[in-house]
Amino acid sequence: MTTFDRYLLQRFLYVCMVFTIAVLGLYIIIDGFTNLDAFQLKSEGKGTTYLVLLMAERYVYQSANILDLAGPTIVVISALCALALMLKQGEIHPMLAAGVPTYRWALALPVGALLLNAAMVFNQEWVLPRIAPHLQTNHGDTVNDKQAVQPQYDPKWWIFITGESTIPGEQRIDAPEFLLPPSIAGDFVKLRGESAYFYARDGESPPGWLITKADPPVTSLKLTDQGRQALVPQPDGTSIFISATLTFDQICQQNSSLRLVSTPELVRRLQQPAASSISRRGQLVQLHARLTRPLLNMLAIFAVIPLIVRRERTSPLQQVTNIGVCMLTLGVMYGGSMACHALGQTGLMRPEQAVWGPLVVSGSYVAWLSGVVRT
């Protein structure tokens, strides 16, 4: 990398840092003041220090979630601002006068975007799945506070799972109720217990739920062949392990669970029979969106370069017009992509077409824009 490359990359990363701090600060201030009553209710009688620590804990974890949502927009807007500032200050004219092509001296922008995309992938695949219980709590709650249960059918055995409440920190359902279908117990049987703990797949051990103090006991059930595969009595005689593919995050926060799981886990869910076509479409859209998001971000960067550094004269009014046109173009690119994702989830478009279609259209437009860049 040349000196100019390092200078441009440093400016780009600096602008990204400023925007990141601004976005996180704005979110914390608005969300914190809006939900201050909930935090005060949970910290009543425990002092101001506990209130501050409770809010700090929540927003430290939520920062990873916000960066996952706003990261692509921050990266592209930062590239736009870095280019606009350099153009305004006349810092690119020496490079153009020396005969360096625009796409060469601006190479630091896509390189920086690649680094930040790698950081976002790391956040999505490693950080979010590990802090998912902290992201599934309400304002003022901790991972050890009770959350509502979202009843679901397990797609493997069609067992209906519900309960009184969930504890995200322990991945536990209090007062669980498992409705066993006739294919498992010969008739509809409601299996209750004191608690149900979720255990993820561990090597050859399948994932499932361990029900403590099960009622009725497994010895009194007339299990079918499938039932003997699904229900495993435990040595203590009062607990039952039920092999299942329905995970804890789907019971606790069904709507946000797809964003909080890693891609291998998402692929595993797609390989299992889905509970509904809507669920499967959502999983397919989420999987393809993860594959295309870095590509769409890079296309947005290559759209910013010719729209800001155009052949026309760079008067102040023209620079403002270029920024406006660039913002409109980025809005159409990202807005169209989100609209197609929604159409894919509703079934009006095939999931693959809904995700890859906007990418193809954006790529064609960016290729056409390469002819208007200043050289």
Image (spheres, rainbow, N blue to C red):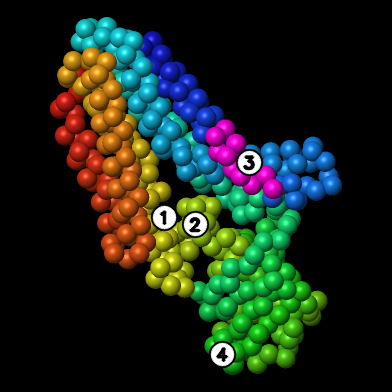
Instruction: State the SS at label 4.
Output: helix
Name which residue type carries label 4: Pro
Instruction: State the SS at label 1.
Output: helix
| Residue 171 lies in the magenta stretch | no
Quadrant containing the C terminus is: top left
Query: Which residue corresponds to mark 1?
Result: 286
Discs 3/2, front: 3
Marking on residue 33: 3
Residue 184 higher or lower than 234, as above or below? below
Query: Residue 166's quadrant in the figure?
Result: bottom right
Name which residue type carries label 3: Phe
Residue 133 higher or lower than 323, as above or below? below
Query: Which residue corresponds to mark 4?
Result: 182
Q: Give the side of residue 90 with respect to residue 263, left or right.
A: left
Q: Residue at x 33, y 20 (%)?
A: 84
Marking on residue 187: none
Q: Is residue 171 visible?
A: no
Query: Which residue corresponds to mark 2?
Result: 258
Callout 3–callout 2 Cβ contact below 8 Å: no
* Magenta region, residue range: 25-37
State which tag comes first along the sequence, 4 or 1: 4
State which tag comes first along the sequence, 4 or 3: 3
Front in this rendered view, residue 6 or 357: 357
Residue 12 higher or lower than 258, as above or below? above
Residue 235 higher or lower than 59, as above or below? below
Callout 1–callout 2 Cβ contact below 8 Å: yes
Distance from the alpha carbon under mark 4 to that under mark 1? 34 Å
